[in-house]
Image: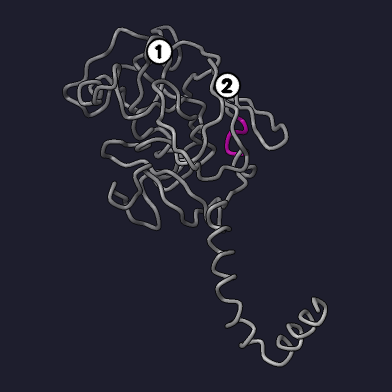
């Protein structure tokens, strides 16, 4: 009886593909929903953006990549020791700028990140401290100052490239203008710990605002590096700047 039923289905397919599609449309819709819920990507090709960066080394192990950084920026700053060749007085545009008492020092920070990021069922809040790594090896922090306060006052201590150190740990909370100046406002800027990429504030010639993005400060679309499309975060000039209400995917391990 089962074999007979299978023969009938094959006959219907040969005689009328349209009837077959109509009769199976409910099953097809269910399959699409299941596919969408488990969509994953492969970020292996983007790792080459870290090649040649003195602060960064990485190693692929199975379906993860281990990225180590010394967190030393490859650009000038008044936070370098004064005898460092990259030391430079503040020459930015913030008339309220004030230098904090910290200075840049070498770190040993390791991210273990999935090469196949996927949307997390249970979203996790971003921690204080490192949440990702930029393409020059400097770490990303979230949108909060110490104690979970707004960045309103702390922004006045950001150097001319919009970074500053906490203790000796240099980091970016907002747009790393050295990178957008170097690679473009629409360029790949780094990875968050969940494996999803971070891009600049421009997409397809349009400067994005928070209203263009979801609550995690990202969306899914085609990028120059992922022509098939990928979920990715964007920098904007409004709080939360880099990342919103937690990671879109499942963050890997961060050790320091």
Percent of width and height locating residue 116:
61, 43
Label 2 sits on a secondary structure element that is strand
Asked if the residue at tag 1 contacts the one at tag 2, i.e. Cβ–Cβ closer than 8 Å, the answer is no
Mark 2, other Cα within 10 Å: few <14 / some 14–19 / many ≥20: many
**In this rendering, position of residue 126 left or right of residue 159:** right
Q: Earlier in the sequence, mark 2 or mark 1?
A: 1
In the rendered image, residue 142, in percent from the top left (x then y), is placed at 37, 29
Q: Residues within 10 Å of mark 1 (few under 14, many from 20)?
A: many
Span colored in magenta: 48-52
Report the residue at 49% width, 19% height from top: 72
- The quadrant holding residue 85 is top left
Counting the numbered discs, the total is 2
Q: Is residue 116 left or right of residue 184?
A: right
Real-space Cα distance between discs 2 and 1?
A: 22 Å
Circle 2 is placed at which residue position?
A: 110
Q: Residue furthest left?
A: 95
Residue 247 relative to residue 201: left or right: right
Residue at screen point 31% across, 51% down: 207
Tag 1 secondary structure: loop
Write down the residue under mark 1: 80
> Magenta: predominant secondary structure element?
helix
């Amino acid at each position: 009886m089962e074999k007979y039923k299978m023969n009938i289905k094959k006959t219907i397919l040969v005689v009328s593909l349209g009837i077959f599609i109509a009769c199976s449309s409910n099953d097809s819709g269910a399959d699409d929903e299941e596919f969408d819920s488990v969509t994953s990507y492969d970020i292996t090709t983007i790792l080459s953006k870290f090649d040649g960066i003195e602060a960064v080394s990485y190693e692929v192990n199975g379906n993860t990549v281990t990225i180590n950084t010394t967190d030393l920026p490859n650009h000038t700053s008044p936070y370098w020791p004064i005898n460092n060749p990259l030391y430079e007085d503040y020459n930015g545009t913030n008339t309220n700028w004030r230098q904090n008492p910290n200075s840049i020092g070498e770190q040993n920070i390791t991210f273990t990140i999935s090469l196949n990021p996927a949307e997390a069922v249970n979203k996790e809040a971003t921690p204080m401290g490192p949440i990702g790594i930029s393409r020059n090896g400097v770490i990303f922090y979230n949108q909060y100052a110490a104690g979970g306060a707004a960045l309103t006052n702390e922004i006045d201590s950001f150097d001319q490239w919009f970074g500053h150190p906490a203790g000796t740990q240099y980091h970016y909370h907002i747009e790393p203008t050295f990178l957008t100046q170097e690679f473009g406002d629409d360029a790949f800027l780094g990875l968050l710990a969940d494996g999803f990429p971070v891009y600049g504030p421009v997409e397809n010639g349009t400067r994005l605002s928070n209203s263009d993005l979801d609550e995690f400060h990202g969306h899914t679309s085609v990028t120059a590096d992922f022509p098939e499309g990928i979920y990715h975060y964007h920098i904007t000039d409004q709080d939360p700047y880099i990342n919103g209400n937690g990671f879109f995917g499942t963050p890997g391990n961060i050790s320091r």
